[in-house]
Amino acid sequence: MHIAIVGCGQLARMMALAGWPMGHRFTFLASPGEGTDCVKGLGDIVVHTLEMEDKVLFEALGKPDVVTVEREHVNVELLATLEPHCAVSPSPAAIKYCQHRGREKTFLNSLGIQTAPFHLANNADELSAGVKALGFPVFVKTCEEGYDGYGQWVLRNDDDLDKLVAEADKLPEVVIEGRVDFCRELSLIAARNASGECVFYPLTENLHRNGILWSSLAPADAPADLHAKAKEIADKLLNAMEYVGVVAIEMFQAGDELIVNEIAPRVHNSGHWTQGAGICTQFENHLRAICDFGLGNTTNNQHAAMVNLLGIEAPKEIVSESNVQHHVYNKSLRPGRKVGHLNLASDDRAALETQLQRIRSSLYEG
Ligand code: AMP
């Protein structure tokens, strides 16, 4: 099939790399000025211009069978103009829920899915009132466009609040969240195809550094009922949205409760370990879902882990370890930039955790 992907980053790259063996071909839609190094050589690249919408965009993309996205910050109105011409998966309506933190949380709560307590604020008065209602500390996040910790403030006291209130006329709409006293961060990657079949990967345990994913470990060491709870959340969400494709649900674990922080309507960094675990990867399952094929196996027999390469290259002695899979995105190095990742897998959980810690310290602590 001919698949068009909105975006030209590493997620588009890995979708295309998964699709080539299946005989799919790819076109990538770049925003003006967007870097395209990640997808070079993997398909045609079309740079979006203002007149490209509806049939003109469909034709500029080479009349694809299906259009998908590698990021949630896309113009959903533009995407919707493609719907009369080809499948667009996930749907613009589903993506729209995830583009606004307030809309997303309201939707989750309407399904009975727990989130952090929150208030929305558009101005200084609403900001102060929201903070007062929740009590310090609070997380203030822009409703739209924030990612990887950007567009986010932690307020611990009145001084922090006063500083942000002084800036409030420059702030876009924000969501104020009460702090969740979590013991760890987890995510669940799931897929649903157009026929309604759903599959769920096991819960993944994630470690962040400066708001950016640092490493993942799967399956998360958790009792069966926590895995079941996460699956129930994903099942409810996928079916309520009539979602098609892979989705990532980021959660906090507090006691034996799961509190949803964010939904990403796309393949996700915390699912990269699926490439090294001997199962159908999140990238292949996304393509299977949007092409309405049956979905692939998501149950790993081995333990798997992933370490991000954030602004660094991995040394030869690490990528030479026999169970290390090395992925590079063809991006130039910049501090903190996601330029690649390492996947590790082992039958021995304790050995894998030791190896993961050793590699993380060797990469980041010199
Ligand atoms: P986010 O941009 O929403 O993914 O948040 C980035 C990171 O900030 C998360 O991975 C958490 O470590 C932390 N965080 C965000 N929101 C909360 C919250 N309501 N309570 C506690 N920690 C949070």
Image (tube, helix red, strand yellow):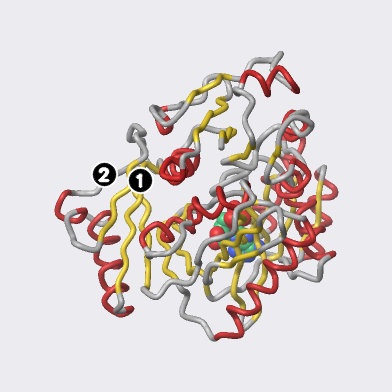
* x and y percentages locating residue 148 in the rendered image: 54, 48
Q: Quadrant of the C terminus?
A: bottom left
Q: Say left or right for 102 vs 21.
A: right
Compute the Cα span from label 2 to label 1.
Answer: 8 Å
Q: Quadrant of residue 110?
A: bottom right
- Residue drawn at the location 47% of the way across and 65% of the way down: 206
Which mark lies nearer to you, 2 or 1?
1
Tell me the number on the disc at residue 313.
2
Q: Quadrant of the N terminus?
A: top right
248 or 119, nearer to the observer: 248
- Residue drawn at the location 70% of the way across and 39% of the way down: 88
- Residue drawn at the location 58% of the way across and 78% of the way down: 227
Name which of mark 2 and mark 1 comes first in the sequence.
Answer: 2
* Tag 2 and tag 1, C-beta contact below 8 Å: yes
| 167 vs 309: above or below | above
Q: Quadrant of residue 65?
A: top right
**Dot 1 surroundings within 10 Å: few (below 14), some, or many (20 or more)?**
many
Q: Quadrant of ligand 1?
A: bottom right
Q: Secondary structure at mark 2?
A: loop
Q: Which residue is mark 1?
A: 340
| 4 vs 361: above or below | above
- Residue drawn at the location 68% of the way across and 21% of the way down: 57
| 300 vs 68: above or below | below
Asked if residue 10 can be seen in this view, the reply is no
Query: Mark 2 is on which residue type?
Result: Glu
Tell me the number on the disc at residue 254.
none
* x and y percentages locating residue 336 in the rendered image: 39, 43
Q: Say left or right for 356 vs 96.
A: left
316 or 29, nearer to the observer: 29
Query: Mark 1 is on which residue type?
Result: Gly
* x and y percentages locating residue 272 in the rendered image: 44, 55
Q: Quadrant of residue 163?
A: top right
